[in-house]
Image (spheres, rainbow, N blue to C red):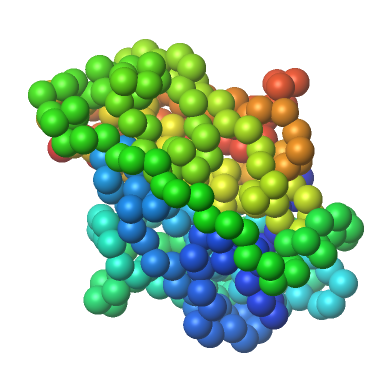
Amino acid sequence: MTATTDHLSTAPESLDRLNLFMGVQAREVRPGHLVLAQEVGSRFHDHRGQTILGSIGVLADACPGGTLGNSIPAGVGMVLSQMSATLAAPLPAHGVVVATGDAVHLDVDAGIGLAAGVMHDGDGAAVAVLQSRGVLVTRPRANADAVLSGERLPVPAPEPCAAPDELAGRAGLDVVDAIASGRIARGPLAGLLDLNLTDVERGSLTATFAPQAWMSNPLGSIQGGVLITAADLVNGLVAQTLTAVDQQYRILDLRIDFVRSPDTDGPDIRAEAEVVRAGRRLALIESRLIDNSGQVLIRAAASAQLF
């Protein structure tokens, strides 16, 4: 499949306003190498009060993808066509996540590049391994002036997590159904995207969220990290529909193909997630983000641990 995504990797000279909005900081920047960090905490938690891959979706997109962006000639753009992340350990609920990325291969003539990276927690322990594939584009930067202006976006107050007693003693399907109906809080991360569940069944669900101006990259489309966040949220929620009373779960890995980028002033985006196989300890999940015409924007595959 030909990748036609139009979300931009991190600018080589400085971080754009979305990265700043998400609390991403640049620690080291040189051609083919990038070290970024993000403070995680209650602002980025899911409904359980946990940090998930979606909590650092923008960071995962920016690094190692940004190592390709700072390696290419001036006047050329680099976008990600594919990203994969494999968790090595649970992400910290609070503290710092540091992402280091390196360009592995860049062929300007062929218009393609590969990069790899690793994420560590504040103690230096590896928590995730990343791989990215980028493609060169010459599309004009329609929103570059605003995104790269250095102006910081206002940070909204985070929505609450669900109370522990609201989750205790419930099967996962009951929890997710209660989130859909508003009886249980959806959590700060879903609140940030304004993600709303519309249909929930065991092993499948549908949700929607509206593009917003803060999600924009310099090309005027939604940055890929925001799409990573949306995909990871619905993958986790559909995994939870499989769990028994008080049973826990976590997403172990996520692979995303960016097919087409939605505009930040476009219509609502529909997210669909489905369990394709469920065992006692592992579930395989497929998800898609789709526009109002039925065009697939991204497709994703994930593995969930049930324990």
Say whether residue 244 is visible.
Answer: no
**For residue 61, above or below residue 107:** above
Say left or right for 175 vs 119. left
Residue located 62% across and 80% down the image: 32
Q: Position of residue 5 (x, y in %)?
A: 72, 47
Looking at the image, which is closer to me, 168 or 136? 168
Is residue 23 something that shows in the picture? Answer: yes
Q: Residue at x 62, y 37 (%)?
A: 298
288 displayed left or right of 144: left
Q: Quadrant of the C terminus?
A: top left
Residue found 48% across the figure and 17% down from its top: 198
Please identify the quarter of the rendering in which residue 112 is found: bottom right
Q: Does 255 sit above or below residue 139?
A: above
| Left or right of residue 259, residue 142 in this image | right
Q: Position of residue 99 (x, y in %)?
A: 44, 71
Q: Residue at x 68, y 67 (%)?
A: 151
Name the residue nearer the viewer: 250 or 162: 162
